[in-house]
Amino acid sequence: MIHLLAIETSTEICSVALSRNEKCLDVIEDNRENSHAEKILLFVEQVLKQSRLKINEINAVCISEGPGSYTGLRIGTSSAKGLCDALDIPLISVSTLQSMAWGTRELYPNYQQFCPMIDARRMEVYTAIYDQHLDVIENINNLILDENTYSDFLSKNKTVFSGNGMKKAIPILSKNPNAIFCNTKNSARYLLEIGYKKYIEQNFADIAYFEPFYLKDFQTVKAKKMGHK
């Protein structure tokens, strides 16, 4: 039996799931923003207790690698690395957008194209397009949405859009009959099947050197000093 612990903190969702082989045993999540640091290890403890497993029965930890929130990704990665180091087990990284496409495909199994979107700045999203086998057909990028977004893909096939960046696409793309919108949220359980396949293939991340896939550099805004324009 292979037990995988999955951690998803790339967006506002803080989610932890546990599987036995490919079957999800339990998942705990919270969609309140900024709860990751407070909840992540508590959720790990709870999901183990509810599944009646001890922490030393975990075979590997799956982490949602990004793109997404800089802070969320840092919290998830440091938690996953800490667990792997303490338990001497491997780390498995899974593309956040690919896992989102998995969750969308679960609800729309008869469609051919899946376009998860993660909210970025203004009209920008982190996005990619996947086929029914979750293979990439349009690479991950940060995209500013306009009326021509993915027009080539939408002219040929129905495409299912999902994620917290989807709300930006709805007013722009909703008139296209090939644009389908799926109101799913990120979940650690979407990491499990992909993570299990990577475990069987022994496709592990290097714990010492693994860094989240931010896609863009983290930017800070300097506060203005009082009395200065």
Image (cartoon, rainbow, N blue to C red):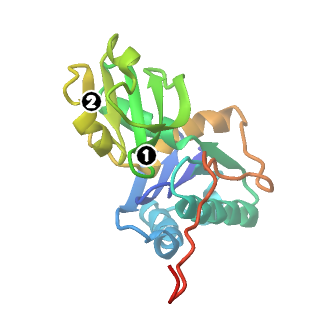
Q: Position of residue 42 (x, y in %)?
A: 49, 73
Q: Residue furthest top?
A: 156
Q: Amino acid at mark 2?
A: Leu
Query: Which of the two residues, 48 or 9, is positioned nearer the viewer here?
Result: 9
- The foreground one among 119 and 191 is 119
Q: Which residue is mark 1?
A: 118
Instruction: Specify whether residue 197 is in view.
Output: yes
139 vs 143, left or right, is right
The answer to which image quadrant residue 50 occupies is bottom left
Q: In the displayed structure, would residue 157 be above or below residue 5?
A: above
Q: Is residue 134 left or right of residue 80?
A: left
Residue 21: x and y in percent read 54, 40
Closer to viewer: mark 2 or mark 1: 2
Tell me the amino acid under the disc marked 1: Ile
Q: Residue at x 70, y 53 (%)?
A: 211
Question: Which residue is found at the position 46% from the left and 51% from the top?
Answer: 188
Q: Residue furthest right?
A: 208
Image label count? 2
Tag 1 secondary structure: strand
* Residues packed near mark 1 inside 10 Å, few (<14), some (14 to 19) or many (20 plus): many
In the picture, the disc for residue 173 is 2
- Give the percent coordinates (x, y) of residue 82: 69, 66
Q: Quadrant of the N terminus?
A: top right
Between disc 2 and disc 1, whose residue precedes? 1
Q: Please report contact status of discs 2 and 1: CB closer than 8 Å, yes or no.
A: no
Estimate how packed mark 2 is, as few (under 14), some (14 to 19) or many (20 or more) residues with alpha carbons within 10 Å. many
- Residue 198: give its label: none
